[in-house]
Image (tube, helix red, strand yellow):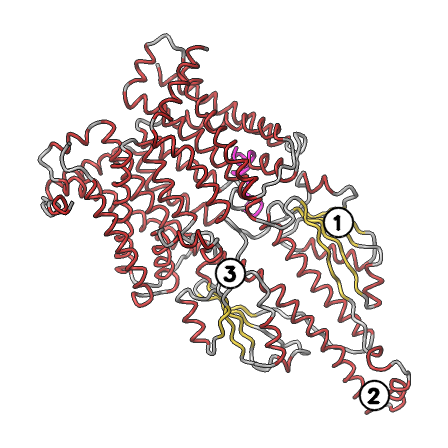
Amino acid sequence: MRVVLAMAWKELLIALRDKKTGFIILFAPLIQLILFGFVVTTEIKELPVGFIDLDDSPLSRRIIERLDPQEAFDVKRRFFSFEEAEGAIKAGKTRLVVVVPSGFEGSIGRDSLSIQFMLDGSDANATRLLLSYLWPTLGHEIQEERKRYLPLMAFERRFKEATSTDFGKLRAISESGEGWSSSLPKISRIKISTRVFFNPNLKSPIYMVPGVIVLIITIISSVLTGVAVVREREKGTLEQILVSPMRPWEFILGKTVPFSLLALFDASLIFPLGVLIFHIPVAGNLFVILVGTLLFLMSTLGLGLLSSTISETQQQAMMTAFFVLMPMYLLSGLFFPVKSMPPFFQWIAFINPLTHFLLIVRGVLLKGATFADLGVSFIFLLIFGALIISVAILRFGKRIK
Amino acid sequence: MWGSLGEVPVIEMKGALAVSVKEALHIVRDPRSLYLNLGIPVVLLLILGYAISFELRREPVGYLDLDHSAQSRKLIALIGQEESFGAPFPVDPPFFPYLRSGKARLILIIPHNFSSKIEKGEEVTLQVLLDGADNNTASIALGTVEELLMAQSDEGMRENLRNEGIPLSGKPITPSLRILYNPALKSVFFIVPGLIALIMMIVSALMTALTVAREWETGTLEKLLISPLSKGEIILGKTLPYFLLGFIQISLILLAGRIVFGVPFRGSIPLLVFFSALFLIGGLGVGLLVSVATRTQQLAMQVTWILTILPGFLLSGFLFPIESMPKVLQAFTYLVPARYYLVVLRGILLKGAGLAELWSQAAFLGLYAAIAMIAAVWRFPRRLA
């Protein structure tokens, strides 16, 4: 054990000895927290929007006015021709243009009512989100306008019918004493009241920042471990260690423990900041996360060691780690929801330890999930971690001989 | 400082080429690094193109039907028909555990007077319980339910009008969409430009920084410096292979994007080559600067990650629109060259834009390439001090 400690201490000294490295280890997580917290947002805000009002009626102006209270954009520009609008879209000055056709007001009671959107498809994701923001409110507003018109039109039609066919009916309506309003047809309405749990204001950072913690733990524990081992090989010091009485498992522990500690240190630095700056909730028991982290570290340290056994140089080790981690990030639910992936990729996501660790961290922090809720993820991390670390140790032993 | 710059033009192509060939061999010799450089861009493209989507698929929905009417059953059946939702299943209170364990994303509670109120033409309120943890998925799910209920509400309105003997249809309106440049709104169309920018950043800045830092570490750079090679020859020789590798990767991504996903190329190829060259030269300059400043691979990697790749990914407008960022970060994006390169790529590939639309991006990229390269040449040691 003394050997392990000595080696771990040496490894920590190497990592922190250099002022630049220490700076990076402290500030890289901070920068990532700020960037991910503020930038990685699925809330679309302040995109430039325009409109063409060919109807120029009270109704069309009311509809256009409804574009205002939305948070989704800040610029609202009026265009007077399609060419002008298209030019603005091509230059990237406008993302979406609402077109109210002429005769819009006159056709409010008819089925032929139509409204057009011109969209910049080159950033499909933002465009889709913007549309999904604007259309429900706008469509709802138009339907509401219709509901105000329709009964009146219905009454008008009935009145006309009555006049032409049966004067008695007309008299009945006017003599019933109920007046206009009560003889309008009644129209039902379905409303919904929503109660949102876990992230009541539907804020992106609440969901993303726990992901940053996962990201940082992953990078430090896997990449730095792999690189530290390869550095000894590159410099030839690995051979010196091998001829020393140190056993392989002592070497492995000595290499992995310091980076686990660094990862935990960075995580515990970032986490309170996330709570402070982005108001990340802590709904559950942090002990559950700690257990999850230790299990997850088995996977990442194992991956780091594995990448070191197939790399001769630090450059190779880093590139390998980088290109293994990239797909892992993309297929973990960190940015993109796993449930939206095709089944094949959902399977890959399922055997990705990051997916499960994310479920644990987000589940505990946001939802207060317990061991029972997260059973599958814990079992998976245990099995995967044990497997990969055994393979890494086996391969490592072979390399050494 | 200009004195040392003045020596740069003394470049003998033979010397630079020799360094390049050695560096290229270093890349090609090792099949894995070749795979990493050529295979990974394509693998990332396939993953991003096939797997990434924000459309909901079979989100679990629970319901509590207190009405037990034909109307309420119809509503539940309608939800089941949506692609976004799985088959709705009945739940009983307490509802919270369903949401916490993820067994249900959304729970719909239909009150007991649902159908009677609709028939009477009154207002009725449904309750929705929503797991908001993943805010994006939650808002899309809620939007889908709202739209469904809006349609149902209109259905009710028609029913009311019919009962009054008024055959007005009042069909719900749908907007007609005219989507420019990417009518199917395929996400891969905006992923290809972003991926090119990202990979270019990696190959130019990260790879150069690592390979030169490695020579610092192993001491082979000192040997190069005392050789008769000039500074310009060393720099040119070291960067040329990565410059070419960058173009091979662009071609690969564009070809794969075209063949597999039908990503268009509407603008001019020479223009794309010109802009990409500027972007690569800038990246190579940054890579050299980082390697000079750090001199170790581990540090070089972390610095490049923070300085170039992370901003290139997050602050370029690749996945997250710049207009939606806080103002301070928006100001920072002007310092991120990938921002300009991305406008160029999207413009040339998707919009068929030419120099008339892109000249300001060209100016920024040119400035960046010039500053980065000049600074790199200036800081690169002439001889061993």
Q: Mark 1 — residue? A: B63
The overriding secondary structure of the stretch rendered in magenta is helix
Residue type (three-letter) at the residue carrying disc 3 = Glu
Quadrant for the C terminus of chain B in the image: top left
Circle 3 crowding by C-alpha within 10 Å: few under 14, some 14–19, many from 20: some
Query: What is the spatial separation of the Cα atoms under label 1 and label 2, in whole angstroms?
Result: 46 Å
In magenta stretch: residue A343: yes
Residue type (three-letter) at the residue carrying disc 1 = Tyr
Query: Which residue is pictured at 28% across the width and 52% down the height?
Result: B368
**In the rendered view, does A21 fall on the left or right side of A283?**
left
Which range is magenta? A338-357
Q: Residue B357: x, y in percent?
A: 33, 66
Are callouts 2 and 3 both on one chain? yes
Q: Mark 3 — residue? A: A46
Of the numbered discs in the image, which one, if any, rests on residue A162? 2
Circle 1 crowding by C-alpha within 10 Å: few under 14, some 14–19, many from 20: many
- Badge 2 element: helix
